[in-house]
Image (cartoon, rainbow, N blue to C red):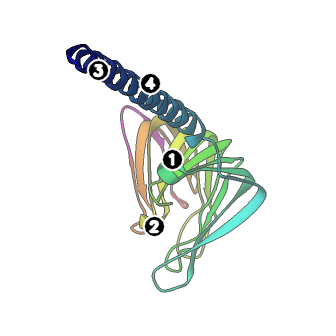
Amino acid sequence: MHKRTAHRWQLTIVMVVGVLVAVGSFWLVQVVNQAGQQAQADQHRDEPDYIIDRFSMVRMNKTGQPAYIISGEKLTHRPVGDASDIDKPYVHSLSGDQPPMNMHADTAHVDQGNTRVKLSGNVDVVRPATPKAQALRMTTSTLTVYPDEERMETTAPVALEIGNATANGVGMKANNATREVQLGGRGQLVLPPRPGH
């Protein structure tokens, strides 16, 4: 009887070790599968969730009035960061207090809850003349626009025309609401002579 008990203990130990190896193997397979699925999910996370060709969208202000229109050839939205890339963007501001501004560029990146638009490549900003303001045209390579705040800025070289006056500089901050423009760095300002002088 003593031999049978010893044999049973050996068999029990072998069975327990076998069960532990089987459970450990199953756990290891599950961990590897989850890691693989997570890596695959991360790989697809930055893929666009929608793409719109030839689009136009209107952003409303707090009072429910149209504030600006953004349109373009193609909008690609990515869920990571809730950001959009736009090919051939056109931004038209509709501020009731100030003259409207039109902005064109090769590309744009919209982020921060649609409150920041980064225009890149052949940026052209035009504000037509009105009875209260002279025409304005600005060209640069990059421009960051905050449409809700009616301001824009860049660190790139800027060429600016206001009426018949021209200015060049490196870097610029502008506020359409206050009609203030600050050129940075070294630049050049050319003012035409006053009429009658």
Give the magenta part as a residue range: 183-191
Residue that mark 1 sits on: 80
Residue located at (51% from left, 53% from top): 82
Q: Is residue 5 above or below residue 139?
A: above
* Camera-side mark, 1 or 3: 3
Tag 2 or tag 1, which sits nearer the N-term? 1
- Name the amino acid type tagged 1: Val
Residue indicated by mark 4: 25
Q: Position of residue 7 (x, y in %)?
A: 29, 16
Asked if the residue at tag 1 contacts the one at tag 4, i.e. Cβ–Cβ closer than 8 Å, the answer is: no
Q: Which residue is mark 2?
A: 148
Mark in the foreground, 4 or 1: 4
- How far across and how far down the image is residue 187, in percent? 42, 34
Between discs 3 and 2, the one toward the N terminus? 3
Provide residue 46's location: percent of width, then percent of height: 57, 40
First in sequence: mark 4 vs mark 1: 4
Q: What is the distance, in whole Å, between disc 1 and disc 2 at their CAs?
A: 23 Å
Give the residue type that dot 2 points to: Asp
Res 102 → quadrant: bottom right
Q: Amino acid at mark 4?
A: Ser
Give the mark nearer the N terminus: 3 vs 4. Answer: 3
Towards the viewer: 58 or 32: 32
Measure the alpha-carbon separation of dots 3 and 2.
Answer: 73 Å
Q: Residue at x 23, y 16 (%)?
A: 6
Residue 188 belongs to magenta span: yes
Residue 183 position, x and y percent, is 40, 44
Where is mark 3, residue-wise?
13
10 Å crowding of disc 1: few (<14), some (14-19), many (20+): few
